[in-house]
Image (spheres, rainbow, N blue to C red):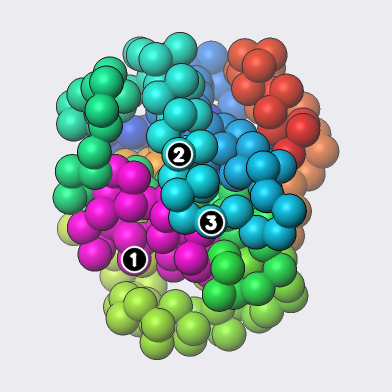
Amino acid sequence: MYGAIIGDIVGSKFEFDRGDRSRDFELFTKHDTYTDDTIMTIAVAEALLAAAGTAVTEADEETVKSELILSMKTWGQKYPGAGYGGRFRKWVLSADPKPYGSYGNGSAMRVSPAGWLYDSMERTRKVARWTAEVTHNHPEGVKGAESIAAAIYMARNKATKEEIREYIAREFKYNLSRSLDDIRPGYHHVEDCMRTVPEALECFFEADSFESTLRNVAYIGGDTDTLGAIAGAVAEAFWGVPDEIVAKAKGYLPAEVIAVAEKW
């Protein structure tokens, strides 16, 4: 889970097309911060752990979604200034929250815990779908969450990059044929899954380490905190995260966020 959190923190200083789109930059600066990507990743992690603890076998859809709604509302209200979109903010404050048909990239940025917790692709994709559907129940929102959880599941189970690329392209019909140099010239800050998930995955595919994945995110620009959270989550599953990078990231995080990450 630290992969997503660190990607969020490192990418935050370049969000909204700030910076010069270079791979050469200081990884951590005084301008970095955690955002809603971190808070909602923590909320999903805590919810999935709680759901797992309530079931003798595997928790059902109703249980998982109830825990997700409770956790996301609790964390969202505790950190109201983390940078949520307008419709999600209303959902967090609603007494009776309902999904609102979003295809925004929020479903993909918060899903990483689902990629780690289960021992089959079927269960991984099913729970990833549930994490999206409580808010982002548009087919593209669901696809964004499922695809990233699937990539994490494959990466942590020693699949090659090419195997991951082929599976995601086949199962989710994303165009993964463009290089970062193809993407970069016309790319800008967008917040939908369709123009975030393929680009984040390509940042991972063209990297040779966790850190270089985040540098690829800065290279193409756009919604860099969310791109960083998504790409960083997959990169963590593939390479791990160096201890010194985790240690630096903790300096930006509230103690209760670290506590959930460490419990995870």
Q: Quadrant of the N terminus?
A: top right
Work out how far the residue at label 3 is from the one at label 2, CA to CA, in angstroms.
10 Å
Q: Nearer the viewer, mark 2 or mark 1?
A: 2
Give whichever of 102, 99 is nearer the camera. Answer: 99
User: On the picture, is 183 further left or further right than 63?
Assistant: left
- What segment carries the magenta color? 125-150
- Determine the residue located farthest toward the front in the rendered image: 56
Give whichever of 182, 92 is nearer the camera. Answer: 92
Which of the two discs, 1 and 3, labels the residue nearer the N terminus? 3
Q: Residues within 10 Å of mark 3 (few under 14, many from 20)?
A: few
Work out how far the residue at label 1 is from the one at label 3, CA to CA, in angstroms.
20 Å
Q: Give the structural element (helix, strand or loop) at label 2.
A: helix
Magenta-span inclusion, residue 207: no
Q: Position of residue 35 (x, y in %)?
A: 43, 26
The residue pinned by badge 1 equals 143
Which of the two discs, 3 and 2, labels the residue nearer the N terminus? 3
The residue under the point 77% across, 33% down is: 263
Q: Give the structural element (helix, strand or loop) at label 1.
A: helix
Q: Position of residue 205 (x, y in %)?
A: 53, 70
Label for residue 60?
3
Q: Quadrant of the C terminus?
A: top right
The residue pinned by badge 2 equals 66
Q: Amino acid at mark 2?
A: Ser
Q: Give the structural element (helix, strand or loop) at label 3.
A: loop
Q: Amino acid at mark 1?
A: Lys
User: On the picture, is 83 further left or further right than 202?
Assistant: left
The residue under the point 64% across, 37% down is: 50
Which of the two discs, 2 and 1, labels the residue nearer the N terminus? 2
The residue under the point 44% across, 78% down is: 168
Q: Is residue 213 visible?
A: no
Q: Amino acid at mark 3?
A: Asp
Work out how far the residue at label 2 is from the one at label 1, CA to CA, in angstroms.
21 Å
